[in-house]
Amino acid sequence: MSADVPAGVRQSAPQRQLPEQRPQQQRLEQQPQHQAPPPPQQQRQQQRPTPQRPPRASGSGARNLRRLRSAGLPVGVAALDGLVVNAAQAGPVLWGALAAAGALVLRRRQPELALAAGLPGFYLGHLAFAPLIALYFLATHRRSPIPGAVGAVLVALAQFLPVPIGDITLLRLDHDTVLGTLDSCALGVGAFVLGRSARQRRERLREITESREREHRLLARHTLATERARLAREMHDVVAHKVSLISLQAGVIQVAEPDAPAVRKAAGVIRDLSVETLTELQHLVGVLRADGGNTRDPAPQPRIADLGTLVEESALPVELCLGDLAGPLPEAVERAAYRTVQEALTNVRKHAPGARGEVRVGLVAGRLRVEVRNTAPGGTAAPPGLPAGGNGLVGLRERAHLLGGSFTAARLPGGGFLVRAEFPARPSLPT
């Protein structure tokens, strides 16, 4: 024992530290005693409780609770009825009444069995709730009304089971007999009628739901078809017109001298038309990819004021006559008028090379009239041979009808052709 240690005091042996504890202790010793508090945003994030997902069993537990309540409520009511009525009795009568009430557990899947188990309750102790509840579910869960009607008759007859046969006198219509008969019939028929009414109401609600879903599907299909038709018309009008101009300029390059100024001019026109066509196609693709809730076009649409540029770019001998429009018209009407002239000039270029044309746009009796006439093909120029799908005039007719207008396309005496469209100044269904 060391001299420095007083007598009677045991010196404890030094505790040996495990190797894995030493680095941890060193790290704790190296940490500063005073640290700067974290910023307020970090403090709020640390104090904010972490959201926890509700246990998955809660949903199933709630469903099980609802099922238990739905199954146990009628059983409990019928059992309480049996206990109250037969409280003074014991033995088979009470147990039979409780068994009839317990059979209501089968009222949804086997309502016939539940009714058969509940009918003896009238004989055991005037237990009425169990068979009436079973009869209600029998009338509700069976498509045919025959099982429910048979059950109603059995319930009405079963109420006479506690009465001795000798006491039943059908020919004596006294007060008690009439009231008992009416009471028996009212209970059976009432439960049956309530059950059938509940079934019819449920079927009616299901039919209404299915009808609304079917209507929504049809409306969605109609909207999709209408939008597809509109985009098809726009694409046909834009692409057919621009491509026909490109073909016309390419024909100029074919017949001209390689070093002629007309070749450079035609090449520049082809380039400009190609860029415009690509821009229009990108615009239409943007409409296709746009959100379904955005029904407005993302780019400005052509109007009647742009017809001068359209006629000038067509490179056709066409005379344009614009009447007094008395102010701007709705965008849908002006766009339809522009597309009508555009398609008519495209057809002139395709099918009547060398023909002269006339475009007239003006108000007639409160309606916008658009007329495009052309003479018979002239000269020796051959048609450019562009493919024609026959959808241009069909699209113009659909566009006019959607706006509440009319459309006419017919040949004229002498080999010419007339395209006429009329649009209301204030359409009821814009496109």
Image: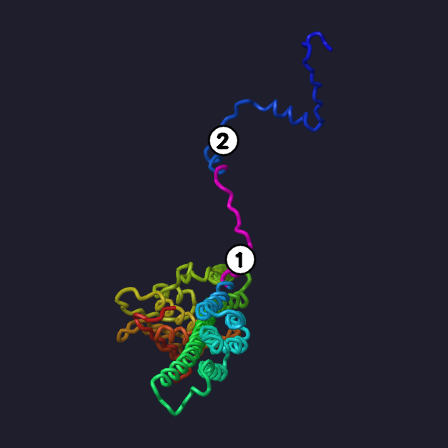
| Picture coordinates of residue 49, whole percent (x, y) | 49, 41
Q: Secondary structure at mark 1?
A: helix
Q: Nearer the viewer, residue 227 or 357?
A: 227
Residue 125 at x, y = what percent? Answer: 47, 74
The N terminus sits in image quarter = top right
Quarter holding the C terminus? Answer: bottom left
Q: Using the rendered image of the protein, determine whether residue 420 is visible from the camera's viewpoint.
A: yes
| Vertical order, 320 against 49 (above or below) | below
Query: In the displayed image of the protein, which residue is found farthest to the bottom?
Result: 171
Q: Residue 132 has which mark?
A: none
Q: In terms of sequence position, does the residue under pointer 2 or pointer 1 come before the other?
A: 2
**Which tag is nearer the camera, tag 2 or tag 1?**
1
Q: Residue at x 47, y 77 (%)?
A: 122
Q: Could you say whether the residue bearing mark 2 is in a helix, strand or loop?
A: loop
From the image, tell me which residue sits under label 2. Answer: 38
Q: Quadrant of residue 299?
A: bottom left
Residue located 51% across and 71% down the image: 104
Query: In the image, is 360 to the left or to the right of 70?
Result: left
Q: In this picture, which residue range is highlighted in magenta?
A: 46-66
Please, which residue is most extreme toward the top here? Answer: 3
Q: Residues within 10 Å of mark 1 (few under 14, many from 20)?
A: few
Separation of residues labelled 2 and 1 (CA atoms): 43 Å
Query: In the rendered image, which residue does mark 1 sit on?
Result: 61
